[in-house]
Image (cartoon, rainbow, N blue to C red):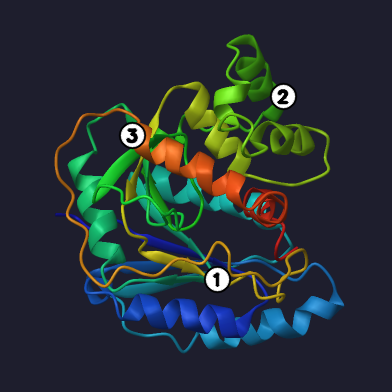
Amino acid sequence: MHLSPLVLFVYNRPEHTRQTVEALKNNYLAQASSLIIFSDAAKDEDDKIKVNEVRRYLKTIGGFKNIKIKERDKNYGLAKSIISGVTEIVNNYGKIIVLEDDLITSPYFLKYMNDALDFYKDNQAVISISGYAYPVKTELPETFFLKGADCWGWATWKRGWDLFETNGKKLLGEIVNKKLSREFDYDNAYPYTKMLKDQIGGRVDSWAIRWHASAFVKNKLTLYPGKSLVKNIGFDSSGTHCSGSTKYDTAISKNPIIVKSMPAAQNKSAVNALKKYFNSFKPNLIKRLYIKFRQTIWR
């Protein structure tokens, strides 16, 4: 199996970055993996000290097959940085595993991602792989599919990323014309349509809602683990737009996730579990989870 490049996007949180990298170094395939890091430039003088601190730390990293650090010379913002960075890497390598600087991974994360990328590489129904799973109460299969795409520790191929539509207005038009809004919003349990409208209106700068919508309108699937291989540590009040919360915390799997053949169809039990999960914490959880797809935590 030819391992996928691992791409990490960082900005101005040195301690979060360190925790993310240390967890990755503990992955079983770390020493065989190529790590590419995109470091965004500071948007102002206040952020410059922390950005420089992150960049000094990046130069000390070891434990991977090879490491490339790409320092932006101007501030892109998270959406532009990820869109341009992912596009560059998938065009060069054909596939990609993506992380941001506030994600702690299981030692089995890279194995699961690479196994799934290899297993589903020719399955046109599958657009991406997710390493994160919501902490729903329902027992789910070891792996399952959901319609759409996700953004906390994910992977895709060039054929998948080629379907990414940057025009939010066009995506909203498709959702409305196909009468998909209710399904898109998990029967009004989660405001994905509103997020897309906010992106269109310039109220949020989100690549993730457009990635999710791009997959959704084309009826593409993302593979999820039944037990999460990723934990987000960014909702600790360290980000610009997030407050402390533990309601989306999930225990990281202590065992490998086995990727195996199954029908390429959305798992109805998982959909119903997510509806219950989103509804159970309204409105506080929705407000916090909204930040997930806003993707303005650092900026």
Q: For numbered disc 2, what is the local secondary structure?
A: helix
Q: Which residue is mark 1?
A: 102
Residue type pointed to by label 1? Asp
Q: In the shown orientation, is residue 47 left or right of residue 39?
A: right
Q: Which residue is mark 2?
A: 169
Query: Residue 168 at what x, y percent from top left?
Result: 68, 29
Q: Nearer the viewer, residue 95 or 296?
A: 296
Q: Which residue is mark 3?
A: 267
Mark 2 nearby-residue class (10 Å; few <14, some 14–19, many ≥20) = some
Residue 215 is labelled as none
Residue type pointed to by label 3? Asn
Residue 291 visible in this rendered orientation of the protein: yes
Mark 1 in CB contact with mark 2 (< 8 angstroms): no
State the residue at coordinates (52%, 22%): 217
State the residue at coordinates (53%, 53%): 85
Mark 3 in CB contact with mark 1 (< 8 angstroms): no
Residue type pointed to by label 2? Lys
Looking at the image, is mark 3 or mark 1 nearer the viewer? 3
When asked about the image quadrant of residue 47, the answer is: bottom right
